[in-house]
Image (spheres, grey):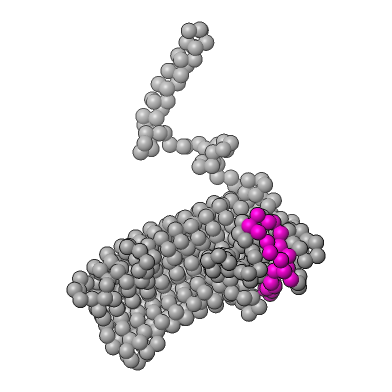
């Protein structure tokens, strides 16, 4: 052992003793590590850092901005700029921005609009047939005619799988052109053969991202130009569409007039949607998509969509609270396939076209129902037509608690029902719900009632 090793050990021993003495009067973490009391910016440490008084911000606008323009290119340039420097705010100044492609968000970016004065919309959609076969390894397509397609456009390619008839959906950007041939941003990875009747359409989300985290979308208006666009499935598009993302906050956003969903996120965790107004969309107001964990949906207005909130497959440990859900054409709230351990509380659900709250049936598996959910302290009023239902529990749903809700009908009673429990429904805890104006307050169709 050399002298330097001995000296180093003595130093570390002395240091550890001093640290122990210094920490003895301070509270340690639960696992015994000392607390962080004076954080510094350390390379690679994303958990702790100083609270900087000023952070990077770049403005975008039709004039008098850091980046001047009114399309997706200038917005994307601003996002890419702050991303290169580790994140920051893109401030969207008042104006109408007409997009030919989605704006792709990156981690640690805040997109901050100017409320009703900053509007993102999109071009009218066009759809053309493909003129030649493309194989799964190709990175180009040939259109039968180009119409108004340009390099830089966001597109969706759709076809039927010629082998099994399943739908093929591929989202790409056109990045190069020679006549009717266009190069794509990425390879196809699926066969687009003419036997499957493939088409190319100028459809895309307004804001989108994949595999990113720590993003805020705030105080901006998104308009999908519904009257001039064909429908785009909410598993792929919407005013906002996210895939495999984490820790997003969507706040004070208006998502309207999309021929599809207003706000959709698939396999995304810890997403907060608050104080938003999602309205007049063809499909879903807010779509917490398959596998999404711990969504928080609060203080929103969800109006005149097909459905207000649609809990997709396997959405767990979420909370929907204090939302005003009005005039949705089918359901105010729908919850189903493996959506468990969620709380739906203190919402006002009015004028739903068919059902106020639906617990969906899914008989394709052994345990595919919306079990162990809580529905409490909601106001559900004027649901459905002549035979409307305020709360409809179907399939083999079980271990659900429905209590403290106010169910009202201010129209004629007709054949309307407050709560309906299907024939195969399991144990449901019903407690302290109030009913007003229904022909039938509780319709329990089970042979062996377990409601209380």
Q: Residue at x 61, y 69 (%)?
A: 196
Q: Can you give x and y, in whole percent of width and height, for residue 124 in the image?
A: 68, 74
Asked if the magenta segment contains residue 136, the reply would be yes
Q: Residue 244 versus residue 194: which sits nearer the camera?
A: 194
- Residue at the outermost right position: 179
141 relative to 281, above or below? above
11 relative to 224 in the view: left or right: left
User: Residue at image x 35%, y 81%?
Assistant: 389
Q: Kindly identify the residue that appears in the image at 63 percent across and 51 percent down.
A: 88
Q: Residue at x 58, y 71 (%)?
A: 232
In the image, residue 347 sits, relative to residue 86, either above or below, namely: below
Residue 135 point in image, percent of width and height? 65, 59
Q: Nearer the viewer, residue 286 or 405?
A: 286
Residue toward you, 423 or 443: 423
Left or right position of 310 against 165:
left
Is residue 70 among what the camera can see?
Answer: no
Part of the protein shown in magenta: 122-144
133 in magenta? yes
Q: Nearer the viewer, residue 165 or 444?
A: 165
Q: Quadrant of residue 93?
A: bottom right
- Quadrant into which the C terminus falls: bottom left
Left or right placement of residue 370 versus residue 302 in this view? left
Secondary structure mostly seen in the magenta stretch: loop
* Residue 109, x across and y down, in percent: 60, 53
Res 121 quadrant in image: bottom right
Q: Is residue 214 above or below residue 328?
A: above
Q: How many marks?
A: 0
């Amino acid at each position: 052992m050399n002298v330097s090793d001995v000296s180093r050990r003595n130093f570390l021993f002395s240091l550890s003793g001093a640290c122990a003495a210094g920490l003895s009067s301070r509270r340690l973490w639960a696992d015994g590590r000392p607390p962080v009391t004076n954080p510094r910016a350390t390379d690679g440490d994303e958990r702790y850092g100083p609270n900087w008084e000023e952070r990077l911000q770049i403005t975008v606008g039709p004039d008098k901005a850091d980046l001047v323009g009114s399309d997706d290119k200038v917005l994307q340039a601003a996002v890419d700029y702050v991303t290169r420097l580790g994140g920051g705010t893109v401030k969207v100044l008042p104006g109408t921005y007409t997009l030919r492609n989605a704006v792709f968000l990156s981690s640690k970016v805040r997109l901050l609009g100017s409320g009703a004065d900053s509007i993102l919309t999109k071009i009218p959609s066009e759809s053309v047939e493909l003129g030649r076969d493309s194989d799964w390894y190709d990175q180009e397509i040939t259109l039968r005619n180009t119409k108004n397609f340009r390099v830089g456009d966001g597109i969706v390619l759709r076809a039927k799988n010629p082998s099994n008839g399943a739908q093929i959906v591929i989202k790409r950007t056109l990045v190069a052109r020679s006549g009717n041939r266009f190069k794509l941003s990425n390879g196809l990875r699926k066969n687009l053969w003419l036997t499957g009747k493939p088409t190319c359409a100028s459809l895309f989300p307004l804001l989108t991202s994949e595999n990113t985290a720590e993003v805020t979308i705030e105080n901006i208006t998104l308009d999908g130009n519904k009257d001039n666009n064909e429908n785009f499935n909410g598993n792929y598009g919407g005013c906002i569409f996210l895939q495999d993302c984490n820790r997003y906050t969507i706040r004070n956003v208006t998502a309207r007039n999309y021929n599809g969903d207003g706000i959709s996120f698939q396999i995304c965790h810890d997403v907060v949607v608050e104080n938003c107004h999602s309205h007049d969309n063809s499909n879903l107001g807010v779509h917490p998509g398959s596998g999404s964990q711990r969504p928080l949906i609060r203080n929103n207005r969800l109006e005149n969509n097909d459905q207000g909130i649609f809990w997709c497959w396997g959405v767990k440990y979420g909370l929907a609270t204090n939302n005003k859900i009005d005039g949705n054409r089918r359901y105010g709230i729908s919850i189903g396939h493996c959506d468990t351990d969620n709380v739906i509380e203190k919402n006002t659900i009015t004028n739903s076209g068919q059902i106020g709250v639906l617990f969906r049936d899914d008989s394709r598996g052994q345990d595919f129902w919306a079990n162990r959910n809580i529905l409490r302290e909601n106001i559900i009023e004027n649901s459905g037509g002549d035979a409307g239902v305020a709360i409809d529990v179907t399939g083999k749903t079980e271990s659900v608690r429905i209590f403290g809700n106010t169910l009202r009908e201010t129209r004629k009673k007709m054949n309307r029902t407050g709560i309906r429990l299907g024939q195969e429904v399991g144990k449901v805890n019903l407690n302290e719900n109030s009913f007003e104006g229904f022909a039938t307050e509780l319709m329990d169709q089970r042979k062996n009632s377990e409601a209380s």
